[in-house]
């Protein structure tokens, strides 16, 4: 009888232990899931309304498939409101925005004097008391150009940060003209990449030379091939041919001896690409073969990825440069690559994998990837890659 009791107690203890272990593991898993749910960007609209979100707009006319103008991609929102009308996105699932810093979107007004408010709705579909006036978070809404709006979520007066809706409301109580809206998302960062506050091309305090930030440095020009580049507050390179490359070039040689990294931000609308980077010298030739971004932070995806790459990995002798090219080595065409915040500076960097980053002899110049036509990327008499201005 005692043996039976002991056995029963051991069995009960084992069951209890297993249950406790399962409970602990399930709680850990929930915690990990909660942590991983915060990604760098949670879109609501990019070319179309994101999955899970619905159009609950009121007193307004909304077209989610507008083709012109667009900030990125192929589509934007054409929104015309009545007095106090609202463009309202609702989700049946509770969205926890804890961990996100900014609600971001881009506006393209069609006339001066337009203004809007941003409203958030809690998990009971009740409007939160905090309202944000767009004009307070911009330098003004200039007509016929895209303006970025960043709403700081730390000013949202709610304890749980659980919402089911967000609205962009006409803010003056009038029947308003059309406005275009694009790229609506929650962001973990207030900026897509480090931004200089200097008004000049070179920020001496941080040794940061700007090539592109909202506009292209006047000393640089677009020499891309195999596609078309459009410059707004960011760059969209629309690839139309195989082996295309986004390429910016300067007539003046740039001495990089006082710098350590080339920096930029990328995102793309398709995966499976093989983007590579190369620097070009005074003879408009690449210093070395194009280096894959696989080994320099990874390929870009549908959200912004920031890169900071050691110049000496691309230009071992640190000679003056005249160009930067980002080439797609995959067989994809009809794809857009978005580029922002191009600079040359000091800072941390990615080094090539399985390669000694100490001083190395300069490699022989290697041929560039095969080009679609000879006139798009002519080779020099040496058989090395030589760039030429040819905007398609």
Image (cartoon, grey):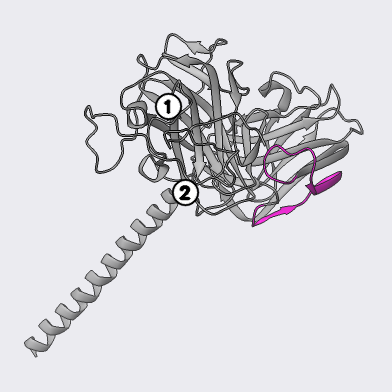
Which residue position is annotated with label 2?
274
Taking depth in this image into account, of 195 and 322 the one nearest to the observer is: 322
| SS at mark 1 in the image | strand
Residue 51 visible in the displayed image: yes
Taking depth in this image into account, of 88 and 207 the one nearest to the observer is: 207
Which residue position is annotated with label 1?
262
Q: Quarter holding the N terminus?
A: bottom left
Q: Position of residue 12 (x, y in %)?
A: 21, 78
Q: Position of residue 90 (x, y in %)?
A: 70, 51
Q: Are marks 2 and 1 in contact (CB under 8 Å)?
A: no
User: Number of labelled discs?
Assistant: 2
Residue 62 inside the magenta-drawn segment: yes
Instruction: Please identify the residue farthest to the left as the structure is shown.
Output: 2
Q: Position of residue 371 (x, y in %)?
A: 54, 45
Point out the stretch of residues depicted in magenta. 50-75
Instruction: Please identify the residue farthest to the bottom as the structure is shown.
Output: 1
Q: Quarter holding the C terminus?
A: top right
């Amino acid at each position: 009888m005692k043996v039976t009791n002991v056995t029963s107690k051991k069995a009960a203890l084992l069951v209890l232990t297993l249950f406790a272990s399962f409970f602990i593991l399930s709680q850990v898993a929930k915690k990990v899931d909660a942590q991983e749910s915060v990604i760098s960007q949670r879109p609501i609209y990019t070319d179309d309304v994101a999955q899970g979100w619905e159009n609950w707009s009121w007193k307004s006319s909304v077209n989610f498939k507008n083709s012109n103008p667009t900030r990125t991609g192929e589509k934007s929102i054409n929104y015309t409101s009545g007095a106090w009308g609202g463009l309202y996105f609702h989700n049946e699932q509770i969205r926890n925005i804890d961990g996100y810093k900014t609600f971001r979107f881009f506006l393209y007004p069609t006339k001066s004097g337009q203004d809007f408010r941003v409203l958030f709705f809690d998990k009971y579909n009740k409007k939160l008391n905090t309202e944000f006036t767009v004009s307070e978070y911009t330098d003004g809404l200039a007509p016929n150009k895209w303006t970025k709006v960043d709403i700081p979520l730390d000013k949202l007066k709610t304890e749980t940060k659980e919402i089911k809706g967000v609205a962009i409301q006409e803010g003056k109580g009038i029947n308003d003209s059309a406005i275009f809206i694009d790229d609506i998302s929650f962001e973990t960062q207030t900026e897509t990449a480090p931004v200089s506050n200097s008004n000049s091309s070179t920020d001496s305090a941080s040794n940061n030379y700007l090539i592109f930030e909202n506009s292209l440095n006047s000393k640089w020009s677009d020499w891309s091939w195999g596609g078309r580049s459009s410059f707004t507050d960011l760059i969209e390179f629309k690839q139309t041919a195989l082996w295309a490359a986004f390429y910016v070039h300067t007539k003046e040689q740039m001495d990089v001896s006082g710098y350590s990294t080339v920096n930029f931000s990328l995102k793309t609308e398709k995966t499976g690409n093989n983007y590579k980077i190369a620097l070009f010298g005074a003879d408009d030739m690449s210093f070395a073969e194009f280096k894959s971004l696989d080994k320099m932070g990874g390929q870009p995806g549908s959200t912004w990825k920031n890169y900071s790459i050691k110049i000496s990995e691309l230009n071992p002798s640190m000679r003056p440069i005249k160009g930067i090219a980002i080439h797609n080595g995959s067989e994809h065409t009809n794809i857009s690559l978005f580029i922002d915040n191009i600079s040359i500076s000091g800072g941390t960097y990615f080094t090539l994998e399985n390669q000694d980053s100490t001083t190395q002899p300069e490699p022989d110049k290697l041929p560039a990837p095969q080009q679609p036509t000879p006139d798009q990327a002519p080779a020099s008499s040496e058989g090395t890659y030589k760039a030429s201005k040819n905007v398609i």
